[in-house]
Image (cartoon, rainbow, N blue to C red):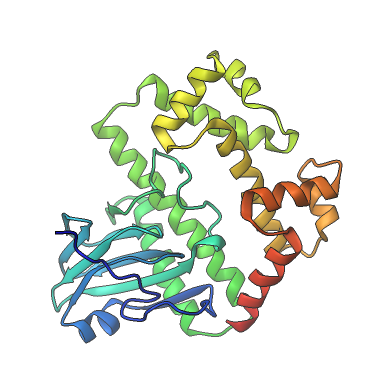
Amino acid sequence: MIRHVPTYGLYGEHTGRAPDFWVHCETIPSRSSRHDWEIRLHRHESFFQILYIEAGSGDAIFDEECHPIRPPAVVTVPPGFNHGFRFAQDIDGLVITIISSHLSHQPGERSLHGEWLAAPHLTSLDPATPSAAYVMETLTRLGEEFENRHNGRNEVLAAYIALALRLTARISQEAYSNRYPADENDRRMERFEGLIQQHFRSHKPASFYAEELGVSPTHLNRIVRASTGRTAHQLIAGKVIEEAKRQLVFSIANVQEISYRLGFSDPAYFSRYFLKQTGSTPRLWRSKERAKLQNF
């Protein structure tokens, strides 16, 4: 029998209208206590969630797999994945819900190791290590910043989220690397991502990157598909769109100027390119995203 898994906005709140916030933060007990400390299997269509488990115990359930939680730990859940939690009553920590389009690295894209942002993930934190201690401090400060409506709150929250995710990904990568030494294809993917970061404004074709890596374009596509489920071209285009979205939301430059910054000689072509990749024009996308921020 196929089990029905409900789709929620925040847990227990059915979708039906566009969210009027880009980030929401609350304590884990404040929501889980309303549901007898069990968050049944569900999913979100457009939200990325971060759970910071500061104390207590419980289980994270990803589809049918159960993962014991030993604090301190961070759980990341991209949109579209079935997940749930069983918490002991001594649980403490935060649940941070973000509209996925506001992430600097989109869910489904490769981030530091394999598919870290493309599937639910549980990362243990060792407070004795500087990176883990910094993640814990950053997430604690994020919760405090959310509660206090100071000037520049959105920018600070965005910075905290990006920093916490990047450092947590690095911790996860290091733990994985210690267990499973990287093979040649992992190294090629890391180098490929570095080359994209270096050259994406030049709009180099996939064949350029293949030549830089010493492989054929077909072989490069095989490596990228095995790691991300996407083609090399899609990964390159994704980086261009990621940067375009970042500048549309967080800069005051007009669309024409942004198109030039991203290496497009024709702003009209940039608009068509953006429309093809996102289903929206740059101006309409910017207007909708800024409206969400204003509503928040």
Q: Is residue 231 above or below residue 183?
A: below
Considering every residue shown, the one lying at the far front of the view is: 1
Q: Quadrant of the N terminus?
A: bottom left
Of residue 270 and residue 192, the one placed in the foreground of this image is 270
Q: Is residue 22 above or below residue 162?
A: below
Can the viewer see residue 118? yes
| Residue 152 in view of the camera | no
Relative horizontal placement of residue 232, taking residue 67 as reference (left or right): right
Q: Quadrant of the C terminus?
A: bottom right
* Residue at (61, 76) in percent of width and height: 292
Q: Position of residue 287 (x, y in %)?
A: 71, 71
Looking at the image, which residue is at 46% across and 41% down?
A: 110
The residue that appears at 54% across and 28% down in the rendered structure is 192
Instruction: Say whether residue 199 is left or right of residue 120.
Output: right
Say which of 213 and 181 sits in front: 213
- The residue located at (58%, 19%) in the rendering is 210
* Position in image of residue 222 (x %, y %): 45, 24
* In this rendering, position of residue 24 left or right of residue 129: right
